[in-house]
Image (cartoon, rainbow, N blue to C red):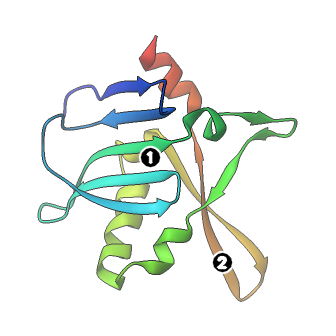
Amino acid sequence: MAEPQIRYDEPSDTLYVSFAPGESATGIELNPHILLRVDKKNRRPIGITLLDFSILAQQTELGARSFPLTGLAELSPKTRELAIDLLRSAPVNEYLVLSAYTPAACETIPITLLRTEKILQQAA
């Protein structure tokens, strides 16, 4: 796979990471700010769209921000499994780190954080 293309649209504050430029894809909304674009038939990532990128990339006094993947709960089991598999695999996991928050022993909330250093390095 070729080096991903990164494009930032300043007026909309949207960052596009494309693993397969020009290929058609289905969007999987991971949360209101993160869209995973996939080729469902071949089970491969096409890209990631990050809305309100400047907010997603903003550091806190404790470090990087994490975001709940609320959209996973809305997906069919098959699509949810595909999204999780792609989040765990390259090249997606080079940009988004999959983790979990467990507020109780019987509750797991999937979360992610953005690897801003990778994006900034490639965008330079």
Q: Is residue 119 above or below residue 87?
A: above
Quadrant in the picture for the N terminus: top left
Return the residue nearer the eye: 27 or 114.
Answer: 27
Coordinates of residue 22 in the picture (x, y in percent): 13, 36
* Mark linked to residue 80: none
Coordinates of residue 98 in the picture (x, y in percent): 54, 56
Residue at horizontal 50%, vertical 43%? 51
Coordinates of residue 4 in the picture (x, y in percent): 29, 29
Image side of residue 28 versus residue 21, left or right: right
Q: Is residue 40 above or below residue 36?
A: below
Badge 1 amino acid = Asn
Look at mark 2 in the image and give the residue it sits on: 108
Residue at horizontal 50%, vertical 46%? 96
Residue at horizontal 57%, vertical 25%? 117
Badge 2 amino acid = Thr
Q: Residue furthest front?
A: 11
Return the residue nearer the eye: 52 or 61.
Answer: 52
Dot 2 alpha-carbon crowd within 10 angstroms: few under 14, some 14 to 19, many 20 or more: few
